[in-house]
């Protein structure tokens, strides 16, 4: 299949201009507790997503969870090399959190960010 260069450049330019801007997750941090251990929480530039990172003394350390919220859909992903037992317990707590609880955490990160 032969594609002409101008057509390929047009398709590439179209894709590039319609892609979402990169998201940063550096608002905060606030501190919270999951599975009886301390976690640092930052919120993201989309105003909906959150990142949870283990703090010193957390047996799941090092571990991070990324919470991507989009309308009524919430996706939780995690990565790390700490205790699977503790990261699994934290995941279960995150999985049962309500939208209101996520919103409260976002507000907490914004308050910390304003005070810094």
Image (cartoon, grey):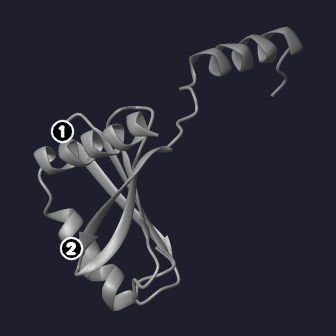
Mark 1 or mark 2: which comes first in sequence?
Answer: 1
Closer-to-camera residue (72/41): 41
How many marks do you count on the picture?
2
Instruction: Give SS at disc 1.
Output: loop
Residue at 37% over, 44% down = 112
* Disc number for residue 87: none
Question: Against 84, is 13 above or below?
Answer: above
Question: Against 22, is 57 above or below?
Answer: below
Residue at 84% over, 9% down = 6
Question: Horizontally, is 12 left or right of 30 in the view?
Answer: right
Q: Position of residue 53 (x, y in %)?
A: 44, 66
Residue 97 sits in which quadrant?
A: bottom left
Q: Residues within 10 Å of mark 1 (few under 14, many from 20)?
A: few
Question: Against 96, is 99 above or below?
Answer: above
* Disc number for residue 92: 2
Quarter in which the N terminus is drawn: top right
Q: Position of residue 17 (x, y in %)?
A: 63, 15
Q: Residues within 10 Å of mark 2 (few under 14, many from 20)?
A: few
Which residue position holds label 1? Answer: 72
User: Residue lying furthest right in this view?
Assistant: 5
Residue at 44% over, 73% down = 55
Q: Position of residue 40 (x, y in %)?
A: 40, 62
């Amino acid at each position: 299949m032969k594609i002409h260069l101008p057509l390929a450049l047009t398709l590439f330019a179209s894709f590039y201009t319609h892609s979402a801007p990169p998201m940063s997750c550096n608002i905060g941090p606030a501190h919270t507790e999951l599975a009886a251990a301390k976690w640092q929480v930052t919120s993201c530039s989309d105003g909906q997503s959150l990142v949870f990172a283990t703090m010193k003394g957390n047996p799941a350390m090092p571990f991070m969870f990324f919470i991507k919220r989009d309308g009524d859909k919430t996706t939780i992903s995690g990565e790390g090399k700490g205790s699977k037992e503790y990261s699994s317990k934290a995941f279960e707590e995150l999985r049962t959190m309500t939208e209101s609880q996520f919103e409260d955490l976002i507000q907490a990160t914004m308050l910390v960010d304003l005070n810094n």
